[in-house]
Each structure stands twice: as structure tokens, then as C-alpha cells.
């Protein structure tokens, strides 16, 4: 994923410079096919080739430094690879997307989003959705979900829009839900997290029946680069610009039906009292 982002940035610089892939490859001193694979993220970029590419494309200092940082990250194994035996390729892509994200916007109409879940709430969700999973694997999934949440401590911004059903359905029982809702209030007060609730009285919106997240990274020329969609059995990652734009529209639509952040927290606290 990082290699593809690096390649996309280089392709953008090449187009801006008015050069073809063949011209760039010739000036760097590599085969055109190799440069094509670099732009598509299908091959790793060596430090020497990146230095030469920066010279050929006339990339300024700060932008060149960002490219080198991304190149180094592309060579680093991700912590999530330790869970590779229980994760699909799409989920591993999601882990990599989140690892570098500066802002994630998510919508879930029926569940509290994974980045906000308590361990007890997450355990009930995972065991209900995968009744035949081994106990050891459940524990690893829980460890993975809790570790994903550490990004919130690193300054990553999260905007979560939840359906009212997500804050009322007593998954795990009343006590588990009560602690889950208290956790949401705590995270909002301590981290760069905004939570909005779509009330039952809201009108139809473009995200009905869907659950998804929009990933944004720092210093991207086209910041809305990827969307992941939650399905019943798997995650799907989309990078196509048209698909991303559709989900941006859907998020704007559902956010327009949601309560403002302060009123949303008031509703969550009311639900806590009712429990």
C-alpha cells in the first residue's frame, strides 16, 4: 500500500514535469518497465533511484524528504503482519492505511465503530459474528483491535457518525453497553475524536445500510485516497477516485442528518442514565 502511494506521488510529479515514463526512465538510467512498476507500486524503490528521480523531476526539498520517508516506511514490516495467519489481505491493507492516517471518517448505523470499542463490547461482536472461531484466535483479534486504537493516542483525528441503534442495542448486556458508552464520552474528551449520532427521527440519507471509513493521510495532494467498507464477512478497500467520491457524498449526507457533537453526547449520556 505504501509503495503504491509512493508510486502515485512520483507519477504526479512526472505529469507535472511534462515527462513520459519512458523519458524519466531513460534519464534515471533504468528500464521503462521498471519505472512503470515503481509508479504502480509493484516494485520497491531503492534509495539511489529515488535520489535520481528527485533530480530528474525537479522535486523540492520538503517534498523530496516526504518521498524518502514514505520509501523507508514501505520497507518496514508492519506490526499487523504478526496476525497475518488470521487476517485477509484486505484487512491487512486496512491496518496499513490506518497506520499512516492523519484523519479517519467512519459511519456505522448499527455498531459502535471498532476504533471506539471496549474489549468487552468487541469480544461480544466478534464471537457473535464468528461462532466457530477458536478461543485463541478470538483473543488475538481482540488484541489486534485494541492495538489499532493506539493510533488515537498518536494524534490521529477520528470523526465517527453512529446510528442511534448503535448506542441503544444492548450488545453484551446493559452493563457492557453502559461501559462502552462511557468509554466513548471519555475518548471524546481526551482525544481528537468527534462522535455524532443519527437519531431514529432522521430522514433517509445516502449511507443507509452501509458501513465504511474514509482514510486521509498528511501531505497528500489528493487527500481522500481510500475507502474501506465493512461487510458481513470481510473488509473491502477502494482506491478508485470515482468510488471514493461516492462515499464522500454518502458521508456528507449522513453527517447532515446527524445531531451536532454536543447534542450527540447529551443523547449518549441520556442512554447511560436509562441503562
Image: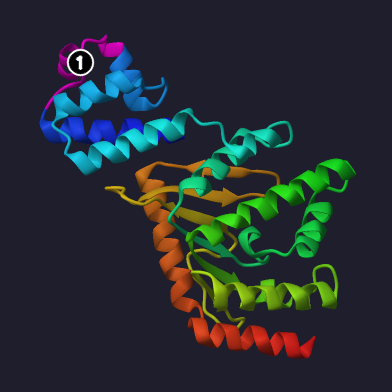
Asked whether, in this view, residue 159 is left or right of residue 182, the answer is: left
Within the magenta stretch, is there residue 21?
yes
Secondary structure under badge 1?
helix
Q: Position of residue 242 (x, y in %)?
A: 36, 47
The image shows residue 180, relative to residue 31, as above or below, that is below
Report the quarter where the C terminus lies: bottom right
Q: Is residue 133 visible?
A: no
Asked whether, in this view, residue 227 is left or right of residue 130, the answer is: left
Q: Position of residue 167 (x, y in %)?
A: 69, 75
Q: Which residue is mark 1?
A: 28
Mark 1 neighbour density, 10 Å: few (under 14) some (14–19) many (20 or more): many
Kindly indicate the quadrant of the structure image that contains residue 40. top left
Q: Position of residue 231 (x, y in %)?
A: 64, 49
Asked whether, in this view, residue 224 is left or right of residue 115, the answer is: left
Residue at the location (48% across, 83% down)?
A: 260
Residue at the location (77% across, 78% down)?
A: 178
Q: How many marks?
A: 1
The image shows residue 56, relative to residue 211, as above or below, that is above
Within the magenta stretch, is there residue 66?
no
Q: Residue furthest left?
A: 18
Magenta portion: prevailing SS class? helix
Residue at the location (69% across, 47% down)?
A: 144
Residue at the location (36% across, 52% down)?
A: 218
Q: Position of residue 24 (x, y in %)?
A: 18, 19
Q: Which residues are magenta?
A: 19-33
Q: Is residue 87 visible?
A: yes
Asked whether, in this view, residue 209 is left or right of residue 251, the answer is: right
Amino acid at each position: 500500500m505504501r509503495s503504491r502511494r509512493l508510486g502515485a506521488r512520483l507519477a504526479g510529479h512526472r505529469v507535472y514535469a511534462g515527462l513520459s515514463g519512458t523519458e524519466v526512465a531513460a534519464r534515471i538510467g533504468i528500464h521503462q518497465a521498471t519505472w512503470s512498476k515503481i509508479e504502480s507500486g509493484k516494485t520497491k524503490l531503492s534509495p539511489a533511484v529515488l535520489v535520481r528521480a528527485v533530480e530528474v523531476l525537479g522535486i523540492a526539498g520538503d517534498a523530496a524528504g516526504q518521498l524518502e520517508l514514505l520509501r523507508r516506511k514501505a520497507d518496514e514490516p508492519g506490526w499487523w503482519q504478526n496476525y497475518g495467519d488470521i487476517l485477509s489481505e484486505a484487512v491487512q491493507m486496512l491496518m496499513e492505511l490506518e497506520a499512516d492516517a492523519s484523519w479517519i471518517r467512519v459511519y456505522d448505523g448499527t455498531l459502535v465503530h471498532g476504533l471506539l470499542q471496549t474489549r468487552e463490547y468487541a469480544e461480544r461482536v466478534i464471537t457473535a459474528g464468528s461462532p466457530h472461531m477458536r478461543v485463541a484466535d478470538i483473543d488475538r483479534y481482540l488484541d489486534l483491535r485494541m492495538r489499532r486504537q493506539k493510533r488515537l493516542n498518536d494524534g490521529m483525528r477520528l470523526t465517527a457518525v453512529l446510528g442511534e441503534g448503535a448506542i441503544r442495542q444492548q450488545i453484551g448486556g446493559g452493563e457492557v453497553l453502559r461501559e462502552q458508552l462511557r468509554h466513548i464520552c471519555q475518548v471524546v474528551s481526551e482525544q481528537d475524536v468527534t462522535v455524532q449520532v443519527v437519531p431514529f427521527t432522521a430522514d433517509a440519507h445516502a449511507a443507509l445500510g452501509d458501513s465504511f471509513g474514509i482514510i486521509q493521510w498528511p501531505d497528500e495532494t489528493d487527500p481522500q485516497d481510500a475507502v474501506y467498507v465493512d461487510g458481513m464477512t470481510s473488509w473491502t478497500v477502494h482506491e478508485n477516485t470515482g468510488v471514493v467520491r461516492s462515499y464522500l457524498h454518502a458521508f456528507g449526507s449522513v453527517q447532515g442528518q446527524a445531531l451536532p457533537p454536543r447534542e450527540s453526547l447529551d443523547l449518549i449520556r441520556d442512554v447511560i442514565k436509562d441503562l
